[in-house]
């Protein structure tokens, strides 16, 4: 409990610095076309990172976890993982970079040619930063497997804080161009520091290429998540067609929800993941089921408390948005409502991580992909219809609905899979 609280504090400070950076951008630049372009440019690098990182972390966390007492093997496995991360990151991101001029107009149909060109310029350093972020994500799970949770999160927190300070100094004079290059520099610095604490596991591209077992496990994750992880692109497709500043408003609300999700994920979900692999390794499926249920219960209680707090604190939130960011009352109201409508997304962003971790501990990487694909298709239909009915609010409602459908399916299949293992032990 003490460790979870410490992790929560460090992660909260890290995310507050990240959100503060976003707020500074809005404060200095304003809500409008320029911030919409900047956020649009972040979308493709973020989606690519999510697809690759999810696949790599899901496969390598269980492998790192069982080597917690074997330092030499832990280091060797890291080199293999780093090699695979380099192959995937550089290969996929380079391919997408070459296609960007074709992809951008299709993904953001509401943008004019000048906006597309500026978004392309912003995307280049952000794509390069994504390569370093992928390698860093592998280092992070390796450190977590050895129970070095605080070290991994502390590095990210300090980097986010320094990045915020850099934005304060350089954004007013150099514009959003400075922000994207600060992002790149920060990614490189975090990677180098993580390498130091992980004992400098230099990427072994050859061993990474030859490690067939992990490639086999990653294949369904990469191909499946390459579709359903594109959900932010679907959102941006429609949001690019709303009035100027729509992408910025939605992104701010989503960033706040994402911040809360990450805090809860680090406090509740992440500490559970390594223990799931150990329960399976010890054939303790009753312990696995109990631990999974406790995790879901904790998430539900916290989400209810957050919902109550958001309603009670509405006047204060409106005042802060209006006075600190100089936002109009209508814009502040929109941010608050979108946050409320995304509470379903917040719950599943955390509880879904717990369910997926159970699947991976049970060596099942296919079920989460199939469930995710089903949810993505349902979400696509919901967004298509609800955007016409409710615009930006329709997108938020559709997002929460399809996430909730996902977690119900996850829970059903997780329990069925654990029960089958229990029966096989009888």
Image: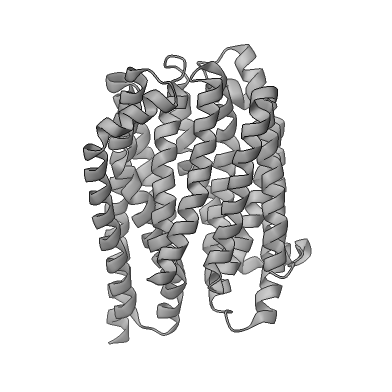
Where does the N terminus fall, quadrant-wise?
Answer: bottom left
Locate residue 386, reporting x and y percent: 29, 26
Pick the residue in front: 1 or 62: 1
Q: Quadrant of residue 180?
A: top right
Locate residue 45, reporting x and y percent: 60, 38
Seen in the picture, residue 307 relative to 41 is either above or below; the reply is: below
Which residue is at 36% across, 45% downward? Answer: 374
Q: Is residue 80 left or right of residue 157?
A: right
Locate residue 220, reporting x and y percent: 52, 55
Seen in the picture, residue 186 relative to 358 is either above or below; the reply is: above
Number of numbered tags placed on the structure image: 0
Which residue is at 49% across, 51% downward? Answer: 13
Q: Is residue 106 left or right of residue 303?
A: right
Which residue is at 53% across, 54% downward? Answer: 54
Pick the residue in front: 79 or 103: 79
Locate residue 188, reporting x and y percent: 72, 49
Q: Quadrant of residue 47?
A: top right
Q: Is residue 122 visible?
A: no
Seen in the picture, residue 256 relative to 388 is either above or below; the reply is: below
Which residue is at 75% across, 67% downward? Answer: 200
Color theme of the render: one colour
Q: Is residue 253 left or right of residue 137?
A: left
Q: Quadrant of residue 192?
A: bottom right
Q: Is residue 354 visible?
A: yes
Where does the C terminus fall, quadrant-wise?
Answer: bottom left
């Amino acid at each position: 409990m003490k460790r979870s609280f410490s992790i929560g504090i460090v992660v909260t400070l890290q995310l507050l610095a990240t959100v503060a950076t976003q707020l500074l951008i809005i404060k200095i630049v304003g809500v409008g076309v320029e911030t919409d372009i900047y956020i649009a440019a972040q979308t493709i690098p973020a989606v690519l990172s999510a697809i690759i990182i999810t696949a790599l972390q899901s496969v390598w966390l269980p492998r790192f976890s069982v080597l917690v007492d074997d330092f030499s093997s832990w280091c060797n496995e890291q080199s293999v993982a780093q090699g695979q991360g380099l192959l995937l990151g550089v290969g996929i991101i380079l391919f997408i970079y070459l296609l960007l001029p074709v992809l951008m107009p299709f993904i953001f149909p509401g943008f004019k040619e000048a906006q597309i060109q500026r978004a392309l310029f912003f995307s280049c350093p952000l794509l390069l930063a994504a390569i370093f972020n992928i390698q860093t994500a592998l280092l992070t799970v390796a450190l977590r497997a050895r129970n070095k949770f605080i070290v991994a999160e502390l590095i990210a927190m300090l980097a986010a804080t320094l990045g915020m300070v850099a934005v304060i100094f350089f954004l007013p004079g150099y514009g959003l161009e400075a922000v994207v290059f600060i992002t790149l520099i920060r990614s490189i610095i975090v990677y180098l520091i993580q390498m130091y604490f992980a004992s400098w596991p230099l990427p072994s591209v050859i061993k990474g290429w030859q490690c067939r077992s992990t490639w086999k496990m990653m294949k369904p994750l990469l191909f499946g998540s390459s579709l359903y992880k594109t959900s932010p692109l679907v959102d941006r497709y429609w949001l690019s067609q709303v009035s100027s500043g729509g992408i910025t408003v939605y992104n701010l609300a989503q960033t706040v929800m994402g911040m809360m999700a990450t805090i809860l994920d680090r406090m509740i979900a992440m500490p559970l993941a390594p223990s799931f692999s150990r329960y399976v390794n010890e054939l303790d499926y009753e312990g696995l089921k109990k631990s999974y249920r406790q995790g879901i219960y904790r998430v539900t209680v916290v989400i209810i408390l957050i919902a109550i707090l958001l309603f009670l604190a509405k006047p204060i939130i409106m005042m802060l948005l209006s006075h600190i960011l100089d936002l109009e009352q209508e814009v502040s109201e929109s941010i608050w409502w979108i946050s409320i409508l995304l509470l379903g997304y917040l719950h599943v962003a955390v509880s879904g991580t717990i369910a997926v971790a159970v699947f991976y501990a049970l060596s099942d990487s296919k079920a989460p992909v199939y469930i995710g694909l089903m949810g993505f298709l349902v979400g696509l239909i919901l967004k298509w219809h609800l955007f016409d009915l409710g615009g930006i609010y329709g997108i938020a409602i559709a997002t929460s609905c399809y996430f909730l459908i996902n977690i119900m399916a996850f829970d059903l299949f997780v329990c069925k899979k654990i029960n089958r293992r229990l029966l096989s032990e009888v």
